[in-house]
Amino acid sequence: MHLSFKLTAVATLAALSGLALAQEQVVKIGHVGPLSGAIAHLGKDNEYGARLAIEELNAKGVSINGKKVKFELVAEDDASDPKQGTAAAQKLVDAKVSGVVGHLNSGTTIPASKLYFDAGIPQISPSATNPKYTRQGFNTAFRLVADDVHLGGLLGRYAVNELKGKSIAVIDDRTAYGQGVAEEFEKAVKAAGGNLVSHEFTTDKATDFMPILTTLKGKKPDIIFFGGMDAVGGPMLKQMKSLGIKSKFMGGDGICTTELVKLAGDAMADGQVVCAEAGGVDGALKKGMDDFGVKFKKRFNDDVKLYAPYVYDAVNVMVDAMQRAKSSEPAKYLPELAKTTGYKGVTGTISFDAKGDIKNGALTLYTFKGGKRDQIAVVH
């Protein structure tokens, strides 16, 4: 009798815990970035941002429409390759994720965005800056940073008006990002009355820049703008130094990383590099970003490289829209996501315009001194 009572109690407890698990709804959120290849350090940085947000949401115990929710991160690697990017996107569509944060590069974000749109899955890119991404008419596409029109434009004007560049050369890596930001830089230089002496091309896999740099050396540019990433920018600076080229080196957020210091070694002179990052905070908001950095370091034993705070905010903005819509179903919370206004994130106040772009997106100008990144100014 005693044994059967115990068995009944165990069965009842098992049934109750099964019921609790059934009531706890699992919501999958996808993340895609390059976890392999030359910029894997930036992809991992992004993934950590997503992981931190998910862990905090689960620790807090979030409910959607009165039901307890457990968030699950489904992370994929696109290796910065458009083909692998669409394969990763298809995996997330098949996994029936409720939303996607990513991709990191414009070159993978743009082709993947079509798959998410066709599946009706909301996508927030924390870092893709090519304007085309949000100009395809996809109501599922959102972006948390200012685009290349703003980024390249700011750098082009700065080169002519502040750095007083007399002869300016451009190199781009032919990716959607590198080409896009270089073209916007060129437009702004011309509009400001600057003198462009050359436009050269490389790839995001190249390691030898001697032929390009030798050509440029003959044209004596005082500024060289590079549209590309730090994995190429660092070695390029080394080869510039070996040729005795002392030109200012400018670029967008792709080279505006703490990793550039390691990649360039002793080839980077103080103040030689001027770059701009999409995003940035100043004033009262700076403390929130600093606190995030401390929390991030404690959890992952690594410093924030670049876009982790934007990924963190993207996950939280997505979940906020689900809570407002009382549903994690993409079709139900997508309209609420589009209506996001005045959300207070780590990266600032988040509101989307009709295209899904962030309103009044900030840009931050930096240089490097003593091996450290040094902020010049935050502009809107």
Image: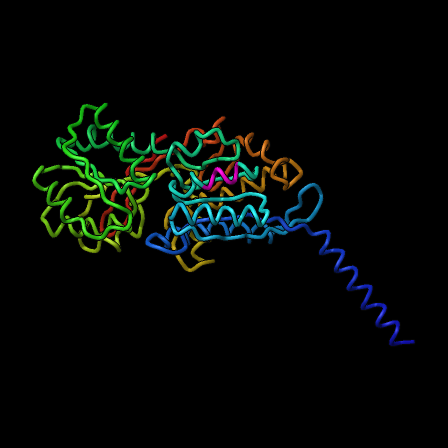
Image check: 240 left or right of 314?
A: left
- Using the image as rendered, state which of residue 345 and residue 115 is in the foreground: 115
167 w.r.t. 43: above or below? above
Does the magenta-highlighted stretch encompass residue 213? no
Q: Where residue 328 sits in the image (x, y, percent)?
A: 63, 42
Q: What residue is rendered at 30% in x and 38% in y?
A: 276
- Using the image as rendered, state which of residue 66 and residue 230 is in the foreground: 230
Q: Where residue 306 sits in the image (x, y, percent)?
A: 37, 47
Q: Where residue 131 sits in the image (x, y, percent)?
A: 38, 32
Image check: 102 left or right of 129?
A: right
The quarter of the displayed image where residue 218 is located: top left
Residue 290 shows in this picture: no
The number of numbered badges drawn on the structure is 0
Quarter of the figure with the N terminus: bottom right
- Using the image as rendered, state which of residue 147 and residue 210 is in the foreground: 210
Q: Main secondary structure of the magenta part?
A: helix
Q: Where residue 91 sits in the image (x, y, percent)?
A: 52, 50
Q: Which region is colored magenta?
A: 112-117
Image check: 202 left or right of 110?
A: left
Q: Residue furthest left?
A: 218
Residue 200 shows in this picture: yes
192 w.r.t. 261: above or below? above
Quarter of the figure with the C terminus: top left
